[in-house]
Structure formats: structure tokens, C-alpha cells
Image (cartoon, rainbow, N blue to C red):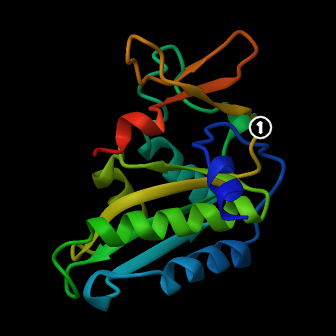
Amino acid sequence: MLAELIAKNRSYRRFVHEEKIDRQDLVALVDLARLSASAANFQPLKYIVSSGPETNDLILPCLVWAGYLKDWDGPTAEDRPAGYIVILGDSKIAKSFSYDAGIAAQSILLGAVEKSLGGCIFGSIDRDRLRGAFDIPEHLEILLVIALGKPREKVVIEPLGPDGDIKYWRDEQAVHHVPKRPIEEIIIG
């Protein structure tokens, strides 16, 4: 059921590194994005898929992992993602990609959850470093990176507290808590 897939689709930042992802599984996830809606049907998105240790190691240091967790610098070697999908916007096809990239990322992540995988979308990216690592042409704008793998952590949704703090946090058992606004607050009228 779609509601279950969406509820399970959390931002996972720690993965079972030993569980590999086949390149064909990543290509199948990109195919879901390819079939998704595109503004004016321009279809300007391109993708880099990575499931090998050499290319994964090029992507990892280009990402800022969890801004609210000040005492955590990112996954350890045992917790690293098994694969990545880099979403690029081709400026020779369109000048704006914001809607397309979000739709594509959600399609990819819902497909990942269906395959018992999890992921995390990154917008905080060292784009110059990533561009250099993969020799990405200038007309391809680096939009998002999605880290993927079998989740090692438990992520739970919490009601937003009375202080209104939206920052996620981890408890003593390393459970990741994500506050969400109540439905009554987000529907107007």
C-alpha cells in the first residue's frame, strides 16, 4: 500500500555495508524516475549510478551527512551506503529542474523501500569535488545525490513538540527520531 511505503521512506544515514546493491537494481530505480512526471515533459534529468567501492568512495566525501547531528561526521566504514544515484539536470534541455528532481528522487526512494532498501537525499554536496571526480560536463547541473542501501538504523516519526522544534535527533539506543507537524497544522481553511 502506498501509505505504508511513504511511512517507511525515511532518511536513513546508516546502512548495512555488507549488503551490496547490484547496478541493475539502481538502473531499475532510475527507470522509475524516467517514467515519472516531468515539467512540460522536457525530461531533462540524467543520472550517474554507483554501486562499486571505487566510485562510492568518490561520492561519500562530497556529502554533508546530518546537519542537526553536530557530534556525528557521517557513517563509519561499516555503515556506509552500498550505492548512490546522482541526479543531474541537463541545461541543454531545460533551464529549471527543481520539480523534476524532487519527483524523481521520491520515485527512486519509494522504489527502494519496495525493494527493502532505504536511502537519503542530499542537497548539501561539494559539487565542485563531485564534478571533478566524475568529469561531469558543465552543462549538467548537479542537483541531488541519493545514498542507498539496506538500513542499519531505526527511524521513527514523532509528533512535533510544544516548542515547535523540527530538528531530528538520536536517542541513547541510536534510534533516529524525526518530528512531524500535525495534519491540523498544515491544512489551511
Q: Is residue 167 above or below residue 155?
A: above
Residue 135 appearing in the image: no
Q: Determine the residue positioned at 62% across, 54% down.
A: 6
In the rendered image, residue 172, in percent from the top left (x then y), is placed at 71, 9
- Quarter residue 162 falls in: top left
In the rendered image, residue 129, in percent from the top left (x then y), is placed at 34, 51
- Quarter residue 49 falls in: bottom right
Residue labelled with disc 1: 152
Number of labelled discs? 1
Residue type at numbered disc 1 = Arg
Q: Determine the residue positioned at 51% across, 86% down.
A: 35
Is 182 left, or right, of 24 in this rendering? Answer: left
Is 106 left, or right, of 135 in this rendering? Answer: right
Looking at the rendered image, the quarter that the N terminus falls into is: bottom right
Q: Determine the residue positioned at 45% across, 16% down.
A: 70
Q: Secondary structure at mark 1?
A: loop
In the rendered image, residue 15, in percent from the top left (x then y), is placed at 72, 42
Is 97 left, or right, of 157 in this rendering? Answer: left
